[in-house]
Amino acid sequence: MGGPAPLPDLFASMLRIRRIEEAIAKRYPEGEMRCPVHFCIGQEAVPAAICAQLARTDRVFSGHRSHGHYLAKGGDLRAMLAELYGRETGCARGRGGSQHLIDLEAGFVASAPILAGTIPIAVGAALSATWRKSGSVSVVFFGDGATEEGAFHESMNFAAARRLPVLFVCENNAYSVHSAMEGRQPAGRRIADMAKAYAMASAHADGNDAAAVWNAGAIALDHVRKGNGPYLLEFDTYRWLEHCGPNPDDALGYRTPAEIDAWRRRCPIEKLRRDSVPGAAEERALEARIAAEIDAAFAAARAAPFPDPRDLGAFVHPARS
């Protein structure tokens, strides 16, 4: 952790996330994955460069667009795919689907589809870490839409007041479902500037530049680990596919083909390939390893059993009467 960005490792992590998501998108129309899916294709640099700087004991939280965060933190791919297929071997025993990923051994505590829902949970985990003197950091990823929820502001205020070891990471992809930033937030204000209201340190960087994400993350994590309180990072990035699902959505008209093309030309993987790594032979070998891993994980997921209907109530929080 810390030091210059390990560009070959970041490239491998980002390419792996991209290929896994592309494989899910290709297979999703088969109808065997019955849960909603939110893809982070185009946004791979942020999870890869932030999670690469975390210890296994640091805890990560995410929202509904969580595949990249889970994988970058070391979450088990076979368990993730089995979860998408609703199988008993899934990371949530087939009961949660794409939006409810978990791998406690890897330090990925939770993702949830409720907008901003895991932000206060991450703050609570940071409070627990402070009480236990564990030295662990909480990192919570969320989109720009989450910054318009009360839970975000309450959590920022509480974390700042208690100087908690939590890193807030906003992946600003410019849209909350189909609503653009200019229709939702004041013109000229950056999300990172919201931290000023809570006397919190913050920074803004290009979320499609893995090295820039790494450098901003290194500064923020050093600040948090030294007991200086929470930190807010805002990264500009862009999702290539529809808000929910495996398809493009330029036909809906809320964003133009020209805008989508402009962001695609800023692909974080292509930028990293141009800037540094790898050689052609190394990349072919990497692609082959990733493809073999994906094929094996899909085969294992589809061969796994469904939960026994008699046990569907197990591991589910009981409803209050």
Image (cartoon, grey):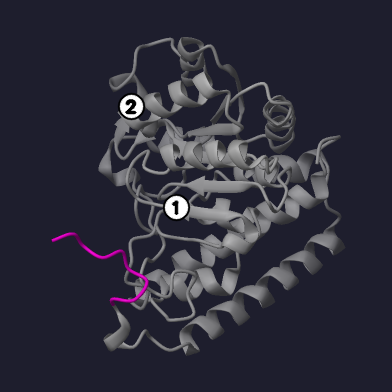
Q: In which quarter of the image is the N terminus?
A: top right
Residue 158 sits in which quadrant? top left
Name the magenta segment's main secondary structure: loop
Spot the residue most to the left: 321
Q: What percent of the width, then of the height, locates residue 89?
A: 49, 80
Q: At 76% from the left edge and 46% from the top edge, which residue is drawn?
A: 273
Crowd around label 1: few <14 · some 14–19 · many ≥20 (10 Å): many
Secondary structure beneath label 1: strand
Q: At 54% from the left edge and 34% from the top edge, which residue is drawn?
A: 169
**What amino acid is labelled 2 in the image?**
Glu
What span is colored magenta in the figure? 313-321
Residue 310 to residue 280: above or below: below
Q: Mark 1 points at which residue?
A: 111
Secondary structure beneath label 2: helix
Q: What percent of the width, then of the height, locates residue 315?
A: 37, 71
Residue 174 sits in which quadrant? top left
Q: At 61% from the left edge and 55% from the top edge, which residue is drawn?
A: 107
Q: Mark 2 points at which residue?
A: 148
Residue 283 sits in which quadrant? bottom right
